[in-house]
Image: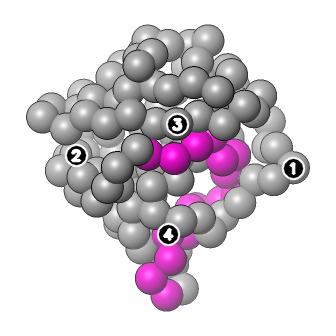
């Protein structure tokens, strides 16, 4: 479908988006800025988007999956275990809409610190 770029400090990467209602809503809202939050090996940040849970929403995903947390109106970027994980899988706090995947190594998300400014824009 399309790509978006996310940047925080010296860290930037692109995301390959799926063609879903929530991904289209995120694209329509670009560009936007927010403050990063962390939860274990997950970075998340608010997005000016309202969405409903989609039928294929998931709680357990692969590292580097880009998700939309409906209850928190946030992009969720897990790259490893979170406090909700049972083993080493990335487990989100609730089921989230899957938007796409990070292009490249998702472990670069470990460089993003809570409170850091994050910018999402069209790639």
Asked if disc 2 and disc 3 are in contact, CB closer than 8 Å, the reply is no
Across and down, in percent, residue 51 comes to 74, 30
Instruction: Classify 89 as above or below 29.
Output: below
**Mark 2 crowdedness (10 Å alpha carbons): few <14, some 14-19, many ≥20:** many
Along the polypeptide, which appears first: circle 4 or circle 2? 4
Q: Which residues are magenta?
A: 87-102
User: In which quadrant of the rendered view does residue 2 lie?
Assistant: top right
Q: Residue at x 22, y 46 (%)?
A: 112
Distance from label 4 to label 2 (Cα)?
17 Å
Q: CA distance from mark 4 to mark 3?
A: 19 Å
The residue carrying mark 4 is 90
Judged by depth in the image, the label closer to the viewer, 3 or 1, is 3
Q: Tell me which label, 4 or 3, sits earlier in the chain.
A: 3
What is the C-alpha distance between the residues marked 1 and 4? 20 Å
Q: Residue at x 71, y 60 (%)?
A: 58
Q: The residue tagged with tag 4: helix, strand or loop?
A: loop
> Mark 3 or mark 1: which comes first in sequence?
3
**Is residue 38 something that shows in the picture?**
no
In this rendering, the label closer to the viewer, 4 or 3:
3
Which residue does the numbered mark 1 point to in the structure image? 55
On screen, residue 32 versus residue 22, left or right, reads left
Q: What is the distance, in whole Å, between disc 2 and disc 3 at their CAs?
A: 20 Å
Residue 16: mark in rendering:
3
Instruction: Give the quadrant of residue 91.
Output: bottom right
Count of all numbered marks drawn on residues in the image:
4
In the rendered structure, which disc, 2 or 3, sits on the residue that comes first in sequence? 3
Q: Position of residue 62 (x, y in %)?
A: 53, 65
Farthest residue, direction bottom: 87
Which is more N-terminal, label 2 or label 1?
1
**Helix or strand or loop: what does disc 2 sit on?**
loop
Mark 2 sits on what residue? Answer: 112
């Amino acid at each position: 479908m399309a790509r978006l770029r996310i940047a925080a400090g010296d860290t930037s990467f692109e995301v390959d988006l799926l063609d879903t209602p929530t991904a289209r809503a995120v694209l329509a809202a670009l560009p936007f800025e927010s403050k990063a939050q962390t939860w274990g090996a997950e970075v998340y940040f608010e997005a000016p988007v309202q969405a409903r849970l989609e039928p294929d929403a998931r709680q357990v995903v692969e590292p580097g999956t880009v998700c939309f947390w409906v209850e928190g109106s946030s992009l969720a970027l897990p790259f490893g275990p979170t406090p909700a994980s049972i083993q080493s899988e990335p487990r989100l706090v609730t089921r989230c809409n899957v938007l796409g995947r990070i292009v490249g190594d998702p472990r670069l998300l470990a460089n993003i610190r809570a409170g850091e400014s994050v910018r999402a824009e069209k790639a």
